[in-house]
Image (cartoon, rainbow, N blue to C red):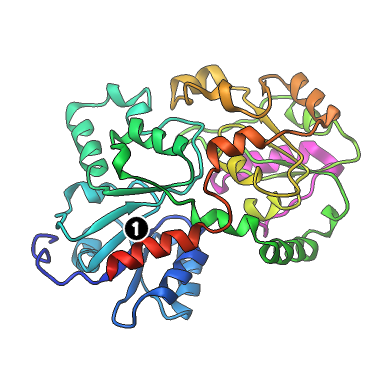
Amino acid sequence: MSQLWRWRSRRDVVYLMSFDDNVPFIRAMGQSLPPDRQLWVLYRPKQRAAAERLEADGIRILEFRDGLRFVLTGIPVVMRARVLFCDNYYAFLGGLAHPANMVIVQLWHAAGAIKRFGWEDPTTPERSASDQRRFQAVYDHFDEYVVGAPAMAQVFERSYRASSQQMHVLGYPRSDRLLDPNWRDQTHERVVRLAPELVDQRVILYAPTYREGVTFTPPKGLAVALRADPKAKVVVKLHPALANAAEQLQRELGSQVVVAKHLSTTELLTVAETLVTDYSSVAFDYSLLPNAHSLLFYLFDLPAYQQNPGVQSDLADWLPSPMLTTNAQLAAAITADEATDFTQFNRHWNTANDGSATTRVIRRYVDLLN
């Protein structure tokens, strides 16, 4: 189907959306386009609400599911793109005709990487030769990568076998809001309205990564460790697929827990005095916020995680705080409540995430359109 549309005029911008963190950037891009160009957002079903907000701003949207319908209706839209933004790995790209005048840009959904992916994933060499060819066919379709720091550029070079010339350290647009006082104030007002129990309290947010294909069972005794400061309020934010595990952990936390179902993890980061995470990219976001006090890495399953999917080989060199592998260590760190120094961590991962990334990214790709 992409071959059938290979010769059509390519004047538009198309954004493939799996995550809703870049909505402000998408809106700004739509407002910056010349009047004779269009912006299309092809969105995964779980991002329907975000897509509908964009549609209200005059942006064209189309639900994006893998299957025959997408081949017939979505591929013709994709082939309109002079610039095609991707916020994730999209398998169909491996079979897409890639005209010379289409620029495919990887605008990743995280500012840094703790876990491995692509060729760095220890399980990739165990896959069949045909699987490996298929993976690389997708990676080869990316012309450019927008990154927030040289460190992330190096991760893509290793993980996707990309070249340093493809990397553009412009900053992640999704990080701009974290440095915007107006956004933080509005978010704080929302937190106050929906979770007043968190106001003027020490908030400990537990937000581990989602372990794909794994039934996440919090270690026995974790709730006791998270309650180490009896005056603190504790919020648990697990992946929606792990609702049962979250409910069990919340019950164990007793009166200290605050259930904040209607607040996103990013919103909760703005009031968290302490973030407890593991391999999640929320660490890179939290470190940019003025309220960030202590960042604790609770890696209870590190030996197993190093085998699948793996962690970055230099992890110990740039973590801003010690690795905690037991409940006793976590409880001690929560009790000590020592401030984390984010200086080196942000120099490593957030070099260009300075609040102006949206402006730089739009300038580059609108100029390319012109």
Q: Quadrant of the N terminus?
A: bottom left
Does the rendering let one see residue 250? yes
Q: Secondary structure at mark 1?
A: strand
- Residue lying at the far right of the rendered structure: 231
Relative placement, left or right, of 284 versus 360 is right
User: Where, by quadrant of the figure, is residue 239 drawn?
Assistant: top right
Residue shown at 48% from the left, 80% from the top: 56
In this view, the residue in front, 256 or 340, is 340
Q: Callout 1, which amino acid?
A: Phe
Can you say whether 16 is above or below 289 in the image? below
> Does the magenta portion include 255?
yes
Residue ID for mark 1: 85
Residue 173 % position (x, y): 50, 57
Relative placement, left or right, of 217 versus 106 is right
Residue 296 % position (x, y): 70, 31
> Does the magenta portion include 55?
no
Residue shown at 86% from the left, 43% from the top: 255
In this view, the residue in front, 337 or 222, is 337
Q: Quadrant of the C terminus?
A: bottom left
Residue 73 % position (x, y): 23, 68
User: Where, by quadrant of the figure, is residue 226 drawn?
Assistant: top right
Does the rendering let one see residue 277? no
Residue shown at 22% from the left, 69% from the top: 80
Residue 240 % position (x, y): 57, 48
Relative placement, left or right, of 147 versus 354 is left
Can you say whether 97 is above or below 164 in the image? below
Q: Which residues are magenta?
A: 239-264
